[in-house]
Image (tube, grey):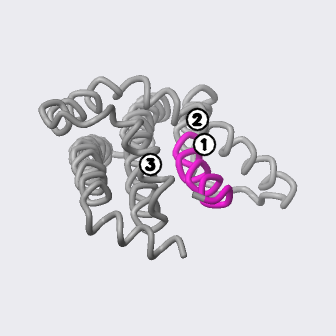
C-alpha cells in the first residue's frame, strides 16, 4: 500500500469524525443549519483536512481496539484448525513472496479498516444528530426518527460487512499461503519475481 493510499484511507475515516464532531459542536451551541453552509476559506479547508486526517488515525486505532475481539474470533474460526502459522506470519510471507497476492491482501485489509472505523462513525454521527435535534428541535418527529433509523441501519449494515470482510480476509490469506506453499504457487512466484 502506498503512502497516498493510506493517507486517503485515513482521510475517508476522518471525514466521518469531522461530521460527528461538527454535529456535537452544533448541539452544544444550538446551531441551526437553516442558514446553509457558511463560506469556507481555502486555508480553513486545509486545516480541516489535517483535523480529518488526525481524527482518522485516532478513530482507526480506537475502532481496531473495540472490534479486535471479533476479528480474533474470525481468525480462530478460519485459521485455528488449519495447523498453519499465525495470521501475521502468513501475511508477512505473502507480502514478501507475491506482489499480486500482496496487493489483494492489502486491498482487503484497507476495506476492512475503513468499514470497521465507519461502524463507529455511523454510531457517533447518529448519536450526535439525535442530541443536536433534541437541542434545537429543527425537524419533525417523523423526520428525526427516519434519520436516526437510517443511521442505526447503516451502522448495523457496516458491522455486518466488517464481520464478513474479516472472515473473507482470513480465508483469503489462508488460501494464498497454501497456494504459495504448493509447487505450482512457488513456480508462479518465481516467474513473477524475474
Residue 137 appears in view? no
Q: Secondary structure at mark 3?
A: helix
Looking at the picture, tell me which residue is in the foreground, 135 or 20. Answer: 20
Q: Judge from the rendering whether residue 4 lies leftward or rightward of residue 189; answer left or right.
A: right
Q: Pointer 2 and pointer 1: residues touching (CB < 8 Å)?
A: yes
- Distance from disc 2 to disc 3, alpha carbons, whole Å, reads 18 Å
Image coordinates for residue 38, horizontal then vertical, percent:
72, 56
Q: Is residue 45 visible?
A: yes
Which residue is label 1 attached to? 18
Is 18 magenta? The answer is: no
User: Left or right: 67 with respect to 178?
Assistant: right
Quote the CA–CA distance across marks 1 and 3: 15 Å
- Looking at the rendered structure, the secondary structure element under dot 2 is helix
Task: Give the position of the C terminus as an image quadrant.
Answer: bottom right
Between circles 1 and 3, the one closer to the viewer is: 3
Q: Secondary structure at mark 1?
A: helix
Give how far across and how far down residue 167 sits, in percent.
22, 44
User: Within 10 Å of the Cα at label 2, are there few (<14), some (14-19), or many (20+) other Cα atoms?
Assistant: some
What's the residue at 71%, 41% (across, down)? 51
Quadrant in the picture for residue 149:
top left
Vertical relation: 188 (above or below) 34: below
What residue lies at 24% left-to-right and 34% top-to-bottom? 75
C-alpha distance separating marks 2 and 1: 5 Å
Instruction: Please tell me which of labels 2 and 3 falls first in the chain.
Output: 2
Residue with the mark numbered 3: 114
Q: Which mark is residue 21?
A: 2
Amino acid at each position: 500500500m502506498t503512502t497516498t493510499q493510506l493517507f486517503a484511507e485515513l482521510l475517508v475515516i476522518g471525514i466521518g469524525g469531522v461530521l460527528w464532531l461538527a454535529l456535537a459542536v452544533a448541539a452544544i451551541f444550538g446551531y441551526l443549519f437553516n442558514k446553509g453552509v457558511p463560506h469556507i476559506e481555502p486555508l480553513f479547508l486545509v486545516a480541516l483536512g489535517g483535523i480529518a486526517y488526525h481524527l482518522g488515525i485516532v478513530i482507526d486505532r480506537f475502532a481496531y481496539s473495540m472490534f479486535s475481539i471479533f476479528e480474533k474470533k474470525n481468525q480462530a474460526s478460519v485459521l485455528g484448525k488449519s495447523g498453519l502459522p499465525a495470521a501475521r506470519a502468513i501475511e508477512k510471507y505473502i507480502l514478501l513472496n507475491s506482489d499480486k497476492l500482496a496487493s489483494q491482501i492489502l486491498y482487503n485489509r484497507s476495506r476492512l479498516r475503513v468499514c470497521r472505523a465507519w461502524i463507529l462513525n455511523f454510531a457517533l454521527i447518529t448519536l450526535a444528530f439525535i442530541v443536536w435535534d433534541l437541542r434545537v428541535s429543527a425537524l419533525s418527529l417523523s423526520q428525526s426518527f427516519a434519520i436516526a433509523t437510517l443511521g442505526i441501519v447503516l451502522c448495523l449494515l457496516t458491522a455486518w460487512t466488517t464481520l464478513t470482510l474479516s472472515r473473507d480476509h482470513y480465508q483469503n490469506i489462508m488460501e494464498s499461503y497454501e497456494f504459495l506453499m504448493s509447487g505450482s504457487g512457488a513456480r508462479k512466484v518465481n516467474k513473477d519475481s524475474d
